[in-house]
Image (spheres, helix red, strand yellow):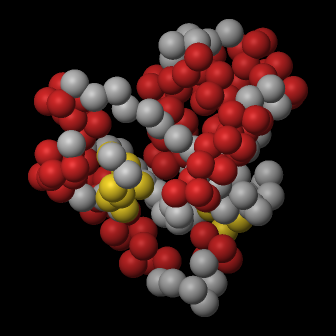
Amino acid sequence: MRTDSLREEFDLNIRWSVFPLHPEIPEEGLELTELFAGRMDIDAVLQRLKRVSSELGLPIGQRTRTYNSRRAQELGKWAEEQGFGEAFHMAVYQAYFVDGRNIALPEELTVIAANVGLDAAKARQVVATQSYAAAVEADWQRAAELGITAVPTSIYNNQALVGFHPYAHYRRLITTTG
């Protein structure tokens, strides 16, 4: 992945922050056609997502629904503290973008957490008590303060790169603003 290459080449400490991407989506999810009705061509968006995923070497499924990611974000903060952040984030990616699973459901998140080596009972408790809600709120607030409106957004020395870009663009961001 690009982040791994950037870490190695520039000895970076990369901090992942979460973003409130459609927090209004209910737990049961929403059809993508309903979410984007009248605002964009969903087929074009999905084709671009497939192309970018292919360029990045990431698997992608044929999802038609989107789900609320708030609980996954909270559990991800806990997973990071436990030293399982990367594994958990990749497992959530797989569950959501490849398998089309509902990552808003506590049961799904508990299974994902257990599959990467986290304690299932503790994961269930983190979700139930929302004990990492403040950490997610802090990231959301930071995103608002920085004017972030899309994912991914990469920031280095207060300069932003929005969207998916070739590796050379990330290198330029680091070498010209460092």
Quadrant (top left, top right, bottom left, bottom right) of the N terminus: top left
Q: Is residue 170 visible?
A: no
Q: At which x and y percent is residue 70? A: 70, 45
- Furthest residue toward bottom: 38
Q: What residue sits 71% from the left and 65% below the top?
A: 30
Is 80 situated left or right of 72 in this image?
left
Q: What residue sits 58% from the left and 12% below the top?
A: 82
Q: At which x and y percent is residue 79? A: 59, 21
Residue 38, compared with residue 158, is above or below; it is: below
Front in this rendered view, residue 79 or 143: 143
Is 95 situated left or right of 168 in this image?
right
- Furthest residue toward right: 129
Residue 13, compared with residue 170, is above or below; it is: above
Q: What residue sits 28% from the left and 28% below the top?
A: 12
Is 119 situated left or right of 122 in this image?
left
Quadrant (top left, top right, bottom left, bottom right) of the C terminus: top left
Examine the image and state in which quarter residue 6 appears.
top left
Front in this rendered view, residue 23 or 120: 23
